[in-house]
Image (tube, rainbow, N blue to C red):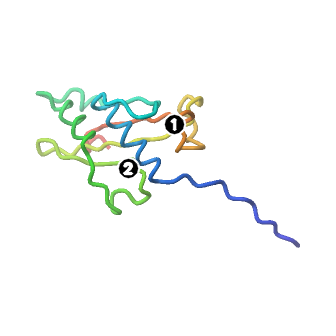
């Protein structure tokens, strides 16, 4: 029996995805345009929307400013998750990557290609998890 090695698909560079995710957070949270177009949308949970006194705006700004990526909270180096503290409350944010034409049903085949990847940034209170 002969075993033929199957070619492995090219693995995307985590630093490219991280840079795109960072640019996307700045775009969706602060309106800062990226160097190249990035497709996506932002969602916030109902409890975050219903929070008082500009809490949601603070959470969105803190999400954009997050830069404390370490191996413990970013093991793959994609900059796709973070946790921030706002007024003693923990807020999580997460970026998921989908095929742009899949109606959010399939993960991105080439996550480092912003032309074919749709990003979804979700911001939520930790207690919503």
Image quarter in which the C terminus is found: top left
Lower sequence index among marks 1 and 2:
2
- Residue at the right extreme of this rendering: 1
- Residue at the bottom extreme of this rendering: 1
Q: Which mark is residue 114?
A: 1
Q: Which mark is residue 105?
A: none
Left or right of 48 on screen, residue 107: right
Q: Quadrant of residue 58?
A: top left
> How far across and how far down the image is residue 41, in percent?
41, 29
Count of residue discs: 2
Q: Is residue 33 above or below residue 129?
A: above
Crowd band around label 2 with a 10 angstrom C-alpha radius: few (<14), some (14–19), many (20+): many
Image quarter in which the N terminus is found: bottom right
> How far across and how far down the image is residue 63, in percent?
26, 40
- Residue at the front extreme of this rendering: 35
Q: Residue at x 55, y 33 (%)?
A: 115
Q: Residue at x 21, y 26 (%)?
A: 50
Left or right of 8 on screen, residue 79: left
**Comparing labels 1 and 2, the label whose residue is closer to the camera:** 1
Q: Is residue 11 above or below residue 34?
A: below
Residue with the mark numbered 2: 79
Q: CA distance from mark 1 to mark 2?
A: 15 Å
Crowd band around label 1 with a 10 angstrom C-alpha radius: few (<14), some (14–19), many (20+): many
Q: Quadrant of residue 21?
A: top left
Instruction: Choose between 32 and 56: the one closer to the eye.
Output: 32
Q: Secondary structure at mark 2?
A: loop
Instruction: Choose between 14 and 125: the one closer to the eye.
Output: 14
Instruction: Choose between 112 and 119: the one closer to the eye.
Output: 112
Q: Residue at x 24, y 42 (%)?
A: 65
């Amino acid at each position: 029996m002969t075993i033929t090695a199957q070619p492995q698909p090219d693995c995307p560079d985590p630093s490219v995805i991280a840079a795109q995710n960072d640019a996307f957070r700045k775009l969706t949270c602060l309106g800062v345009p990226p160097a190249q177009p990035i497709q996506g949308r932002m969602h916030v949970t109902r409890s975050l929307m219903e929070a008082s006194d500009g809490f949601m705006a603070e959470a969105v700004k803190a999400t954009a400013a997050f830069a404390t990526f370490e191996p413990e909270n970013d093991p793959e180096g994609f900059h796709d998750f973070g946790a921030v503290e706002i007024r003693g409350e923990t807020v999580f944010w997460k970026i998921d990557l989908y095929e742009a034409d899949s109606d959010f049903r399939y993960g991105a085949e080439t996550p480092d290609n912003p032309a074919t990847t749709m990003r979804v940034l979700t911001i939520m209170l930790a207690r919503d998890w």
